[in-house]
């Protein structure tokens, strides 16, 4: 059976919470909410007021991990300051998963490129996961969505370098590109397996720049807002977002956005994740 993806062109905080209910899935126990805290200087990331209704609905804790590149989120001290500056710790319980080591190591027996994933050790404190993704472009991955949040997003600072380097942290920015994309898929699978399917995904197609929320200097959005998608399948939800961009033929910014995705072979992450069994690329899109 194809996974159901609920889709609404109405992009409001309340609609996100409403669409979560349509899945009829109860995230049990202590819920980790993975989102992007936003690099200082970035103008496009989705702010606390946008995510507030859905986070409150699940009673979740906002979780993040330190970055592997220079900026205002690459050390625990700086990242905690940024979480406060951007309003996350003001509105929610916040947990920087890799604030202190050692990392939690997840095995990936089926991994094509990497066999281990290094994540923030505090992930072990949670029973289920809500992945809130701002769908947009990305300078290296081509696009950023649910699969990137599961992999790079939940990886510790060391784990991010390990994935980027396709298993060799010294090759963080120089590894073979498709191997990096495949390593992301491997890492995503390890988190899916860890939570045994107790995960819900929300992708919001709003403020879509070709650049990620990790960029302090990012291009402004180039394509019109499209909508909100919710699903229990990370492969299907990312594929649906890519398909919706391809369907936006009348949007003057479509070509620029797709150039970023295609030039980085972004869809290969989806292909690789599907090949591993992390999800499926076919889906039933139900517009609300």
Image (cartoon, rainbow, N blue to C red):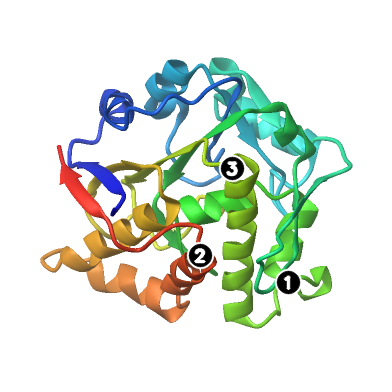
Give the vertical position of 34 relative to 176 (above or below).
above
Give the vertical position of 262 relative to 207 (above or below).
below
Give the vertical position of 203 relative to 124 (above or below).
below
Tell me: 137 left or right of 277: left
Tell me: 33 left or right of 67: left
3 and 1 marks in contact (CB < 8 Å): no
**Mark positioned earlier in the residue sequence (3 or 2):** 3
Q: Disc number at residue 165?
A: 1
Front residue of 40 and 47:
47
Front residue of 111 and 43:
111
Front residue of 37 and 240:
240
Tell me: 250 left or right of 262: left
Question: Quadrant of the rendered structure where residue 37 is?
Answer: top right
Q: Disc number at residue 263?
A: none
Camera-nearest label, 1 or 2: 2
Residue 57 horizontal/vertical position (percent): 42, 17
Cα distance, mark 3 to mark 1?
A: 25 Å
Q: Disc number at residue 273?
A: 2
Cα distance, mark 1 to mark 2?
A: 18 Å
3 and 2 marks in contact (CB < 8 Å): no
Residue 189 horizontal/vertical position (percent): 59, 56
Which residue does the numbered mark 3 point to in the structure image? 40
**Mark positioned earlier in the residue sequence (1 or 2):** 1
Q: Looking at the image, which residue is at 69% across and 44% down?
A: 72
Camera-nearest label, 3 or 2: 2
Q: Where does the C terminus fall, quadrant-wise? A: top left
**Element type where label 1 sits in the image:** loop
Q: Looking at the image, which residue is at 58% across and 55% down?
A: 188
| Res 217 visible | no
Q: Residues within 10 Å of mark 3 (few under 14, many from 20)?
A: some
């Amino acid at each position: 059976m194809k996974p159901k993806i609920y889709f609404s062109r109405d992009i409001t905080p309340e609609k996100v919470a409403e669409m979560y209910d349509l899945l009829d899935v109860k995230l049990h126990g202590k819920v980790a909410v993975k989102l992007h805290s936003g690099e200082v200087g970035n103008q496009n990331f989705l702010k606390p007021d946008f995510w507030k209704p859905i986070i409150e609905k699940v009673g979740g804790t906002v979780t993040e991990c330190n970055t592997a590149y220079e900026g205002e989120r690459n050390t625990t001290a700086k990242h905690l300051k940024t979480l406060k500056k951007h309003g996350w710790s003001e509105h929610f319980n916040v947990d920087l998963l890799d604030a202190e080591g050692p990392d939690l190591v997840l095995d990936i027996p089926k991994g094509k490129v990497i066999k281990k994933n290094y994540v923030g050790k505090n992930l072990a404190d949670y029973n289920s996961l809500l992945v809130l993704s701002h769908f947009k472009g990305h300078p290296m991955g081509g696009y950023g969505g649910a699969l990137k949040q599961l992999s790079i997003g939940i990886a510790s600072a060391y784990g991010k370098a390990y994935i980027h380097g396709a298993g060799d942290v010294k090759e963080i920015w120089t590894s073979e590109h498709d191997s990096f994309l495949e390593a992301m898929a491997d890492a995503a699978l390890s988190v899916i397996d860890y939570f045994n399917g107790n995960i819900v995904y929300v992708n919001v197609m709003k403020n879509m720049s070709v650049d990620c929320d990790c960029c302090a200097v990012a291009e402004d959005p180039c394509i019109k807002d499209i909508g909100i998608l919710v699903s229990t399948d990370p492969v299907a939800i990312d594929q649906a977002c890519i398909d919706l961009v391809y369907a936006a033929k009348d949007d003057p910014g479509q070509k620029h956005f797709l150039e970023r995705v295609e030039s980085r072979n972004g869809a290969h992450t989806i292909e690789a994740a599907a090949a591993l069994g992390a999800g499926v690329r076919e889906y039933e899109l139900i517009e609300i």
